[in-house]
Amino acid sequence: MNEAKRFGKALKALLNEPAVYGHFLDEQTGFGTWTAGGCGGLGVALVEWLGPKASLWAVYDDIGVLHHVVVRVGDWFLDGDGVARGRTILRRAEEWEFLPEPTLEPFVPVACEFVWDSYRKTEDLVGLLEDRFGAGGAVARILERS
């Protein structure tokens, strides 16, 4: 298993710890999971933590409706399921969300304006990521090399 996949597995484990999951999702959105309701807040925190090598991307359906927010670093995409390549993110959208022709494109803030009011705990999540994994820039460099 390469370094990116190891990190992805550790990220998913952290995000699914009951105290983390409950603290950030229950108080943040009142519903959902990291991949259904909590993806925007997680994405914002990951970009802030990882630094300039990271950017928000999203899965859109065939008419341009946003369905899921992810973070891109190099050829890798991060979300509540860990780290994956773009083709895996799109396959999940087809199989799990039944999107017939999903696309993976840079995030367009207008498409999801309402989400930002719900993510007050981004700084806490960034702090948690730093405490567990160290400096985000170092992780971003690992992802770019993998």
Image (cartoon, helix red, strand yellow):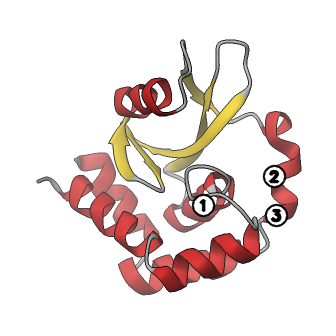
- Which residue appears at 28% of the width and 57% of the height? 142
Secondary element at image label 1: helix
Tag on residue 118? 3
Q: Provide the residue designation for mark 1.
A: 42
- Of residues 138 and 122, the one drawn nearer to the viewer in this rendering: 122
Residue type of the residue flagged with mark 2: Val
For mark 3, does the 10 Å Cα neighbourhood hold few (<14), some (14 to 19), or many (20 or more) residues?
some
Secondary element at image label 2: helix
Residue type of the residue flagged with mark 1: Leu
Q: Are marks 2 and 3 in contact (CB under 8 Å)?
A: yes
Nearer the N terminus, badge 3 or badge 1? 1
- Which residue appears at 49% of the width and 62% of the height? 50
* Picture quadrant where residue 70 is located: top right
* Picture quadrant where residue 29 is located: bottom right
Q: Provide the residue designation for mark 2.
A: 115
For mark 2, does the 10 Å Cα neighbourhood hold few (<14), some (14 to 19), or many (20 or more) residues?
some
For mark 1, does the 10 Å Cα neighbourhood hold few (<14), some (14 to 19), or many (20 or more) residues?
many
Where is residue 24 shown, x and y percent of the image?
64, 75
Q: Is residue 143 left or right of residue 116?
A: left
* Image quadrant occupied by the N terminus: bottom left
For marks 2 and 1, give the CA distance: 12 Å
- Which residue appears at 45% of the width and 27% of the height? 90
